[in-house]
Image (tube, helix red, strand yellow):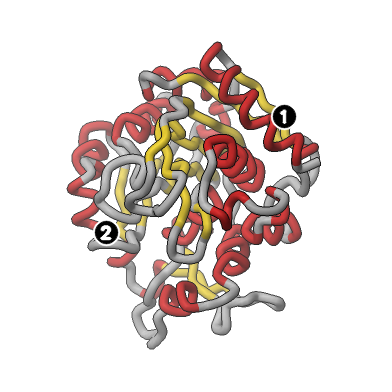
Amino acid sequence: MGGIAEIFIAGASDRTIGVQRVLKDMDTSVFSGSEIALKANYNSADPHPASTHIDTLDALCTAILAEKPKKLVLAERSGMGNTRSVLEDRGVIALAQDRGFSVAVLDELDRTGWREIQAPGLHWSRGFFIAGVFARADSVVQTCCLKTHRFGGHFTMSLKNSVGLIAKRVPGVNYDFMGELHSSPHQRLMIAEINKFYRTDLIVMDATEGFTTGGPDRGKLIHPEVIIAGTDRVAIDAVGVALLRSYGTMHDVMEGRIFDQEQIAHAAQLGVGVSSAEDIRLFPLDKTAESVAGRIQVQLDADM
């Protein structure tokens, strides 16, 4: 991508106000008349920060729907539980009915709902399949959480949230793609590679709380009390790693330069986002955000 990534940060003792505040500084008019695919974080039915908080989802969808898109579809595949049950348990199905957006349970798609990805240099032995709703969308919005990942990802924010929009299994294809991912020594590179094959137009990270250890479903809680937003997945993750480091986090996330973390480094190499901490500009929007931005900037400065 190149250029400068602008990252907006707002205090969020009230999630709805926090989401509204960061979106005021971003151009949401691009969603008018568009078909929009939304990827939230519903890997499991555990509460935030394991999964997207319903207030964050509501505020984000309300803002998108205010732009009168042609269609808004939340599409999801859970890794720890039955997807439809997870979405019901977390209140997503009910919210969709109330607000007027659609929900696509990706495990229930037939073969035509998936697009096969094959490309030179992939660390996926058989390629992978991405949900067609994301490949076809005019715009893609993502909302993610702030947390570490104890099963080999090291951290799970915007880049790793993309795992939930590719298939575990595809009808007619006798292969477990998630089995390969989670057993591979190249897991973090494979995560980065997913991101090359779809776009994002907006990312909202709910960092009101986070996990500094464990994850993705449970861990040591922190309370930064901010919402973070931008359009660059690499920059969002770099900022998230910086924030985790400012609190002290697990060794795999603490060690080395932020831009040497495998997910971040490989995604930057593939052109998914910025390639250095120097390319990130923080825009704190209130006093709480200024304090958090200061913590993040110290970590980003150490990377330069």
The residue identified by callout 2 is: 83
Question: Quadrant where the C terminus lies?
Answer: top right
- Residue at the image point whose x is 32% and y is 40% from the top: 48
The residue identified by callout 1 is: 281
Rendering coords of residue 227 (x, y %) = 48, 28
- Residue at the image point whose x is 37% and y is 31% from the top: 56
Note whether residue 36 is visible. Answer: no
Q: Circle 1 sits in a helix, a strand or a loop, which is it?
A: strand
- Residue at the image point whose x is 70% and y is 76% from the top: 121
Q: Which mark, residue 24?
A: none
**How far apart are the alpha carbons under marks 2 and 1?**
36 Å
Amino acid type of the residue that numbered disc 2 sits on in the rendered structure:
Thr
Note whether residue 105 is visible. Answer: yes
Badge nearest the viewer, 2 or 1: 1
Badge 1: how crowded within 10 Å, few (<14), some, or many (20+)? some
Q: Nearer the viewer, residue 217 or 105?
A: 217
Rendering coords of residue 116 (x, y %) = 52, 74
Rendering coords of residue 277 (x, y %) = 75, 40
Say left or right for 135 vs 235.
Answer: left
Amino acid type of the residue that numbered disc 1 sits on in the rendered structure:
Arg
Relative to 14, residue 61 above or below: below
Query: How many numbered tags mark residues here?
Result: 2
- Residue at the image point whose x is 30% and y is 62% from the top: 80
Rendering coords of residue 279 (x, y %) = 78, 38
Relative to 201, residue 217 above or below: below
Locate residue 133: give its quadrant.
bottom left
Badge 2: how crowded within 10 Å, few (<14), some, or many (20+)? many
Q: Circle 2 sits in a helix, a strand or a loop, which is it?
A: helix
